[in-house]
């Protein structure tokens, strides 16, 4: 089921969405498409996991509580890395820099943005 879901996900994002964007001649941010693809895969895995839990009659409350405690421990351990990732996403979505734009530097000088990436 997981492989079937991943195949459908790859076909949808790799063919349908990309062709639709090319036909409409929109500028497509590949990072956003990749993020949506990974979120869709995560949802597929989560759905299969929920079906597995229900089939094997595992207590979901205890499982969710233990995952919550583990998530807090992971977040505290990887706080700086998560901070960097979230700021990178914010900068990517906000797009404060554009090619051929100007950036004010020290002592009244300006710099030109050649590329963003």
Image: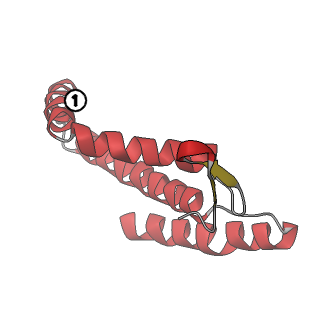
Where residue 13 appears, x then y in whole percent? 60, 67
Q: Is residue 102 above or below residue 26?
A: above
- Image: 92 above or below 90: below
Residue shown at the point (78%, 68%) measured from the top left: 20
Query: In terms of image quadrants, where is residue 58?
Result: top left
38, 53: nearer the viewer: 38
How many numbered dots are placed on residues in this image? 1
**Rendering coords of residue 14 (x, y %):** 60, 73
Q: Is residue 23 left or right of residue 79?
A: right
| Residue 1 in view (yes/no) | no
* Front residue of 1 and 12: 12
Residue 79, percent from left and from top? 23, 37
Residue 11 coordinates in the image, percent (x, y): 59, 73
Name the residue: 54% across, 60% down: 31
**Is residue 85 in sight in this rendering?**
yes
Which residue is rendered at x = 39% and y = 70% of the image?
3
Mark 1 Cα-neighbour bin, 10 Å: few <14, some 14–19, many ≥20: few
Residue at 80 percent of width and 63 percent of height: 26
Seen in the image, is 90 located left or right of residue 14?
A: left
List the single residue furthest toward the front. Answer: 107
Could you say whether the residue bearing mark 1 is in a helix, strand or loop?
helix
Q: Is residue 40 above or below residue 67?
A: below
Rendered-image quadrant of the N terminus: bottom left
Q: Is residue 82 left or right of residue 108?
A: left
Q: How is the image coloured?
A: secondary structure
The residue that mark 1 highlights is: 64
Q: Is residue 114 above or below residue 67?
A: below
Tell whether 103 sits left or right of 63. right
């Amino acid at each position: 089921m997981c492989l079937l879901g991943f195949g459908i996900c790859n076909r949808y994002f790799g063919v349908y969405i990309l062709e639709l964007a090319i036909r409409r001649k929109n500028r497509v941010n590949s990072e956003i498409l990749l993020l949506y693809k990974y979120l869709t895969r995560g949802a597929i895995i989560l759905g299969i996991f929920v079906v597995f839990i229900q089939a094997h009659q595992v207590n979901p409350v205890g499982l969710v509580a233990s995952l919550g405690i583990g998530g807090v421990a992971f977040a505290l351990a990887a706080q700086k890395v998560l901070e960097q990732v979230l700021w990178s996403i914010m900068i990517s979505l906000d797009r404060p820099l554009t090619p051929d734009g100007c950036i004010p530097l020290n002592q009244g000088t300006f710099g030109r943005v050649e590329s963003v990436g």
